[in-house]
Amino acid sequence: MQVSARNQLAGTVKEIKQDDIMAEVTLQLADGVELVAVITASSAQRLNISVGSQVYVIVKSTDVMIGAD
Amino acid sequence: MQVSARNQLAGTVKEIKQDDIMAEVTLQLADGVELVAVITASSAQRLNISVGSQVYVIVKSTDVMIGAD
Amino acid sequence: MQVSARNQLAGTVKEIKQDDIMAEVTLQLADGVELVAVITASSAQRLNISVGSQVYVIVKSTDVMIGAD
Amino acid sequence: MQVSARNQLAGTVKEIKQDDIMAEVTLQLADGVELVAVITASSAQRLNISVGSQVYVIVKSTDVMIGAD
Amino acid sequence: MQVSARNQLAGTVKEIKQDDIMAEVTLQLADGVELVAVITASSAQRLNISVGSQVYVIVKSTDVMIGAD
Amino acid sequence: MQVSARNQLAGTVKEIKQDDIMAEVTLQLADGVELVAVITASSAQRLNISVGSQVYVIVKSTDVMIGAD
């Protein structure tokens, strides 16, 4: 399935921290470039991801902000 | 100002496309790694960004999804 | 690709209204059950959708609210 | 109160799972059509919902994505 | 209808700027305290709001970030 | 750093409730005007906020909805 969300970057699962409801997944996109995703624990299970899994980071473009110094 | 949003990645503005209300900003994070942000045209003006500006991409972790093959 | 977003419902594209930047897509899930998605015009083109296309509506569970009378 | 969020679908609460902070609410829209909402536990209490409650699922159109095969 | 979104603040419509698809609505919450909402133009019409309308600003708590100096 | 998110209001932290993953932060903007933010517990720690901290509430304009009676 192709998704309308514009931003889809390849990454590797580096850490998963979860409780009964939520999971915080740290993803490595490149050396020193990490992103954190907060998804439901049941979605993490359904995707069957663990440390080392090759995944995609997906972000809808209306959810991306820009910061400038 | 420091922002609670977990994900803040350095990037360069590659393209800005805008109409009266919305702006679509393409950002380059690394060679071949791009993200698109949709913000208001007035925010783009307020940040005073143009092609080549050094900026940060900011995404709240609850807005990050994961895809797996 | 499987996506972590919990909510994925089958639907049919009923109407697409777009300008240079944004597209408003009306989707029919069942008789009398419609949802509207606002995505970028370039995502609509990339997905190659038109009226009648069979698609999925995808919503991250943290973006769903509940209303009660 | 009428809400600007475009997508408001009638449903029934099927399951509520919660911890001190978050609640994961499964809603049935029709036979075999379910959506999951993640809201705060205190919002779930304030709405006074329980299994069987008739509610509305509300989603802002900018939070809806489209998937295509 | 009561909505699960935790944050509902009373305000007055101060300005509406819109094109065919999107509307940018500036809301005044108090003297010198303004918020901007980007909703679809059709939602703005459906709510029948104009400058001076008494409305509520609604934000889901998972969409609120915190900044600190 | 300046952030594209249009809505940035000054406030004071009134209460922090957190578990291992999520934190629910209640912020006071003015007398009787409160907002709740749900962020990750690690972001709350990184910002080093506690009850009484002077902070900013930040909301992207595409995440603001409008309600009308």
Image (cartoon, coloured by chain):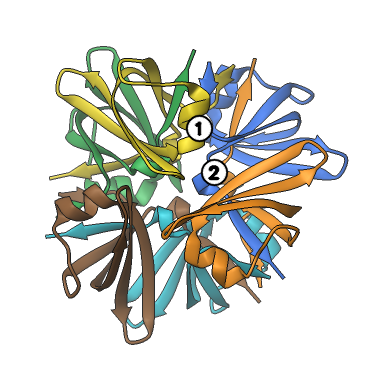
Chain colours: A blue, B orange, C yellow, D green, E brown, F cyan
Picture layout, residue A48 above or below residue B24: above
The amino acid type of the residue labelled 1 equals: Ser
Mark 1, secondary structure of its residue: helix
Q: Is residue A2 left or right of residue C10?
A: right
Q: Residue at x 70, y 61 (%)?
A: F46
Picture layout, residue D63 above or below residue E53: above
Chain of the residue under the numbered disc 1 shown in the image: C
Q: Quadrant of residue A15?
A: top right
* Mark 1 → mark 2, Cα distance in angstroms: 10 Å
Q: Quadrant of the C terminus of chain A?
A: bottom right
Picture layout, residue F37 above or below residue A8: below
Mark 2, secondary structure of its residue: helix
Residue situated in front as seen by the camera: C17 or E30: C17
**Outermost residue toward the bottom?**
E31
In this view, the mark in front (1 or 2):
1
Q: Are marks 1 and 2 in contact (CB under 8 Å)?
A: yes
Residue C63 drawn at (x, y percent): 41, 41
| Residue position for label 2 | A61
Disc number for residue C43: 1
Residue A8 drawn at (x, y percent): 64, 32
The amino acid type of the residue labelled 2 equals: Ser
Q: Using the rendered image of the protein, determine whether residue B10 is visible from the camera's viewpoint.
A: no
Chain of the residue under the numbered disc 2 shown in the image: A
Residue situated in front as seen by the camera: B55 or A47: B55
Residue F16 drawn at (x, y percent): 52, 64
Q: Is residue C8 left or right of residue D44?
A: right
